[in-house]
Amino acid sequence: MIDTDVLIVGAGPTGLFCAHQLGIIGLKCEIVDNLDKLGGQCIELYPDKPIYDIPAIPECTGEELTNNLIEQIKPFKTNFHLSDRVEEVKKEKNKWLVKTNKGKEFKVSSIIIAGGVGSFEPRKFPLKECEKFEEKSVLYSIKDKNIFYNKTVSIFGGGDSALDWAIELSAISKVQLIHRRDEFRGAQASVNKVKELNKEGKIELLTKYHLSSINGDKKIESINIKHDDGGSKNIETDYLLGFFGLIMQLGPIANWKLNLDKKHIPVNTENFETNQKGIFAIGDICTYTGKLKLILSGFHEGALAARGCFKYAKPDEKLRFEFTTTSKSVHSRLGIKKDD
């Protein structure tokens, strides 16, 4: 039995930063994640994709952001339990008893759910023939963009991931962006950039088309795409990239007696606590009026949730707000030595 203050479920950016905030106020935590690595969706789906909305960092990749967050929590010696999943949660007096599918047991005063939107997998092309090319030339995430250097890449989708990768890969590849509609769901700035690159001949934009068949044996040689008006095109390509969003599965969280709103968890915005006292939810999985699904928002939610955990971990103590720039207790936890 591992006895600690808080168990964080999810090792994505929001969960990692929350661990930092817990450490800052003197609480210990353990982190469980069903993936085999830290970083959540940032690492699993777009480790090489640029991120532009982290404060004071003009541009970084998902991998760089994850590595920096890991470095930031090193002073707190956080333990990670990867490739593991929380299966059972029950209340015993003023503690939560948690069991994982690997048989680990935790006794904690609070639980913070930072599991993104639960377990996820990408939506795939509906064509059965795509399966034999998966992980070779049919991909649903990019872990090394250099494999596309001087190749022809056909990107399907109309959201941010499709637009962002079309823009990014246009510098090193011949890019064909194919979408079933004229309208795109991504950020307007990205839509404008794609249209600009299309005019410059750096991206070929094909709208109102969908994939109808693949030609090739051991590798893709070309694809056929069909237009809404019934016409079709055959285009040569080396890779198919599908960005159709994710299929979300809450898994065992659905049985934790939380007031679920579809596949999200409603919280209060004072400390991001759920209807179950001592269980908090942060990041994409939580919902409230005005919710923005940004990493920035997850950081804010994690900071407040960490402080919400304090009263359960140390009910006889009063949490005193301290600035990290001047607090001697914070400096001590971070291993910083400063002269008085």
Image (cartoon, rainbow, N blue to C red):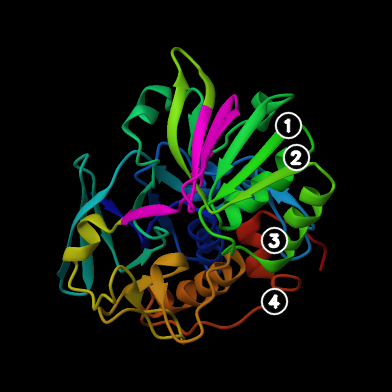
Residue at label 4?
323
Which residues make up the magenta segment? 223-248
**Three-letter amino acid code of the residue under disc 2:** Ser
Is residue 69 among what the camera can see? no
Q: Which residue is mark 2?
A: 170
User: For the point 58% across and 41% down, which residue is it?
Assistant: 155
Left or right position of 7 against 42: left
The amino acid pointed to by label 1 is: Ser
- Where is residue 135 drawn, in percent x and y? 45, 26
In which quarter of the view is residue 126 placed?
A: top left
Q: Is residue 247 magenta?
A: yes
| CA distance separating discs 3 and 2 | 14 Å
Q: Residue 288: which disc?
A: none
Indicate whether 38 appears above or below 86: above
The answer to whether mark 2 and mark 1 are in CB contact below 8 A is yes
Residue 265 % position (x, y): 33, 74
Q: Amino acid at mark 4?
A: Phe
Q: Which residue is at a point 26% across and 75% down the rendered structure image?
A: 260
Residue in the picture at 36% in, 64% down: 113
Residue marked by disc 1: 173
